[in-house]
Amino acid sequence: MVSSLKKGAVTASAPAKVILFGEHFVVYGEPAIALAIDKRAYAHAQLRKDKRVYINSADMHVSGTFMGERFQAAKGGSKARAKLEPVKSAIQQVLEKAQKKVGVNVQINSDIPVSAGLGSSAAVATSTIVAVSQLLGMELPRNQIFRMAYESERLVHGTPSGIDPAISTYGGSLQFQRGKDFVPLNVQANIPLVIGNTRVERSTGDLVANVRRIREHYSSIIDPIIKAGGKIAVDAVEALRQNDLRTVGDLMNINHALLCAVGVSHEALERLVYAARKGGALGAKLTGGGGGGCMIALPEEKKLKQVMKAIERAGGTAFMARKTDVGAQVES
Ligand code: PMV
């Protein structure tokens, strides 16, 4: 491994994700499918003359300097430290790996809406790891970038499934199943998506706990629903490989109905999902934890704008997204 100090600055980026199929059911061992989308977080890293670590996140509106155990906020007041700690952890892991006692400035800019279930924190951690390691002259293998980003994610989510840092690191589409390795899906289809954000805040942890509660009470009803969710993901892989977007859309609609059945939809999500379908989407469903957050719609190419407008008229913020195969990378 090369480990000389590089002069100047490095910018790296990493993509956001959507869960296309299988959220929540994945907690019970069923497969889930996630896609990297063409919204990215960018980390710009520079060496400092001292040993401090300064981080500025434009999108989280926080900045501050870590000096050993101490922290001084420059922007964002008392909340700044907790928000920047995962980025600091990402930087720290790289500095330790490089065995370099140096300071860095990291500037984070991102196209990814925060706290919306689109994997923003993982993309920030992953791009930071790539930028800082390259700055220090290290070419980290992807599995190491993933492991470091996963460690940093643990500070945000406690026990993350790992799907967010995996997608941010590798890009493309992945099948994920508990206790098994990620399987890259090698989907060639250029999947046009519209993402609608309800801007309703929610806690993924609470929603996961609610599903657990109803499953405990009604296991003979809920278990077959969970199994059906897994079967949808399996069938969806085939439909995606065949570029059969009509089937993918149908499966999205069925998947959404099952997620409603286990109690993780929300009236704001329903409004956007129905508006998207009425606007011409082949399928629409909530994505991620549910209870608010985001939904995704799959329109035919020619109806992309129409579906986006329909979601906006129903009260959501909407943007178009496409699958990207570009995982974490150096930009300059
Ligand atoms: O809201 P997100 O994108 O963090 O997705 C959560 C996905 C769940 O299946 C609901 C939980 C999990 O850990 O897999």
Image (spheres, grey):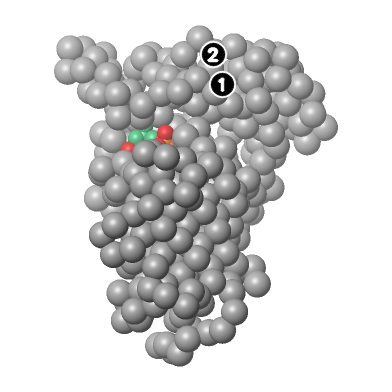
> Is label 1's Cβ within 8 Å of ligand 1?
no
Residue that extends furthest to the right in the rendered view of this protein: 302
- CA separation, marks 1 and 2? 6 Å
**Occupied quadrant, residue 280:** top right
Q: Measured from the top left, where is residue 51 in percent x and y?
A: 38, 73
Q: Residue at x 34, y 44 (%)?
A: 82
Q: Residue at x 17, y 18 (%)?
A: 216
Q: Residue at x 46, y 70 (%)?
A: 104
- Tell me the crowding category of disc 1: few under 14, some 14 to 19, or many 20 or more residues within 10 angstroms, Cα based: many
Q: Measured from the top left, where is residue 296 in percent x and y?
A: 59, 30
Q: Secondary structure at mark 1?
A: loop
Can residue 68 be seen from the camera position used here? Answer: yes
**Occupied quadrant, residue 239:** top right
Q: Nearer the viewer, residue 204 or 106?
A: 106
Indicate the amino acid at tag 2. Ala
Task: Kindly identify which residue carries mark 1.
Answer: 198
Which of the image's four quarters has the C terminus?
Answer: bottom right
